[in-house]
Image (spheres, helix red, strand yellow):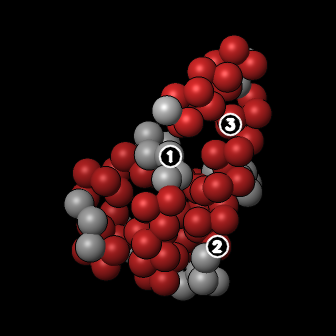
Amino acid sequence: MVNTLDISSHIKQRLVELGLGQKDLASAAQVTESYVSQLLAGKKTRQPRRDRYYEKIGEFLRLPSGELAKLAEAQRRLEYRRRPRSHRRLCSENAAA
């Protein structure tokens, strides 16, 4: 079963269901194959400027509009809460600078 907050697994599952590959996804979303590879490996985290990519990917995978961006944001928040408080404080300070 796929973790509902794991965007990488969600995308992989949809690719399998639709019989598509990473190359197909990269082409449709107009991103590099390297980007797709990193996204599926969980190395890319959500950033607001990437929402357009999530929208293109979601459209290609026939997902409801905004679903991947919402899922990515939920995953990012969950990972943030799991960090030690000292690390969260440093991240907040760096974001404010």
* Residue type indicated by callout 3: Glu
> Could you tell me residue 51's position as x and y percent?
48, 67
* Residue type indicated by callout 2: Glu
Alpha carbon distance from label 1 to label 2: 15 Å
| Residue occupying the point 50% across, 59% down | 48
Quickly name the residue at label 1. 45
Q: Which mark is residue 58?
A: none
Task: Answer whether residue 67 is visible to the viewer in this image.
Answer: yes
Q: Name which of mark 3 and mark 2 comes first in the sequence.
A: 2
Q: Is residue 58 left or right of residue 21?
A: right
Q: Name which of mark 1 and mark 3 comes first in the sequence.
A: 1
Q: Nearer the viewer, residue 6 or 85?
A: 85
Tell me: residue 91, above or below residue 27.
above
Tell me: residue 65, above or below residue 15.
below
| Residue occupying the point 60% across, 21% down | 90
Quickly name the residue at label 2. 67
Task: Answer whether residue 24 is visible to the viewer in this image.
Answer: no
The answer to whether mark 1 and mark 2 are in CB contact below 8 A is no
